[in-house]
Image: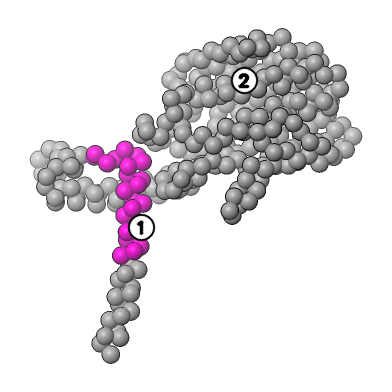
Amino acid sequence: MAQQGAAPAQQGSTWYDWGAGIVNYASDTLNNFLGWEDLDVVNPEDGKAEKASGSEQSNEGFNQEMRKQVWGTKQFQQYIGKDVTSLLSLPVWIMEPFTILQKAAEIMEYTELLDKADQCDDPYERFAWVAAYAVSPFNAIERAWKPFNPILGETFELEVGNGVKYLAEQVSHHPPVCAAHAENEHFKYDLVSAPTTKFLGNSLEVYPHGRTRITMARSGEVYTLVPPMARVHNIVIGRTWVDASGPLKLNCPATGVQCVLEFTPCGWFSYGRHEFSGFVTDAGVLRRHTRIMPCSYTIFS
């Protein structure tokens, strides 16, 4: 009987050790993510700092335990559900060698679509080209590295082969806001970007607050664009990947045409990933179903 009673206890201990191992692994990963792997331990008696990587095992164990307690009870809990855009100092190894101003300029790669839109006489064809331009940047969504935050007043200038001149400036630091303007003989592009985030533990949601406006030169039509939300998965544990979900809204008040494209969130076994569909509605409320695959410049009606 004693041996039978010991078996469940041993099994419970095994599950406890297994769970504790996962917690320790997650804590170590989070500490490394925040750059806390070389924190100093301050002795409360004399106020002197001691390196955790020193030879004394007691100090190292104390440091490890302190980091786990601080992250588990304070840092982790207080940041969940909050906007962490300006709260966390991230290690440099998760950054890509670009700033947010440069990343915002990557959409200028596809401005030839707006050139074609300006040359169209049919308003619905123009709208189709502008919609294609709106979804074209999502072919680079898999880059999960974070760009550097620009300093206040920092600018970035770019010239594209089709005569586009682009200028962006960081106009606010807390909260981070950047403004950009681009133009050539066919269009004008204006952007005010003030994104917010929500930290969810092992994922981060990015909400694209701000305004994007495109003005055609020939027709004078103004298009307003609101991109979908993006979510960064496995930012602490697992392979980091990015997915877009929710509506992309494009509107032209002059013609009454508007488009809402619903980006499908990734499901089990990557079901629905890289897919989005929606409707184009004209002034007469005529709905035409449109299914678009990303990385394609063509809209199929």
Q: Quadrant of residue 14?
A: bottom left
| Secondary-structure class at tag 1 | helix
| Crowd class of label 2 (few under 14; some 14 to 19; many from 20; radius 10 Å) | some
Identify which residue is drawn at 81% across, 41% down: 289
For residue 219, side relative to residue 193 (left or right): right
Identify which residue is drawn at 19% across, 51% down: 61
Identify which residue is drawn at 32% across, 42% down: 32
Identify which residue is drawn at 78% across, 39% down: 290
Residue 172's x, y, as percent?
49, 22
Task: Confirm whether residue 199 shows in the render.
Answer: no
What range of the chain is rendered magenta?
17-39
The residue that mark 2 highlights is 108
- Which is nearer the N-term, disc 2 or disc 1? 1
Quadrant containing the C terminus is: top right
Mark carried by residue 131: none
* Depicted 25 relative to depicted 101: above or below: below
Residue 39's x, y, as percent?
24, 39
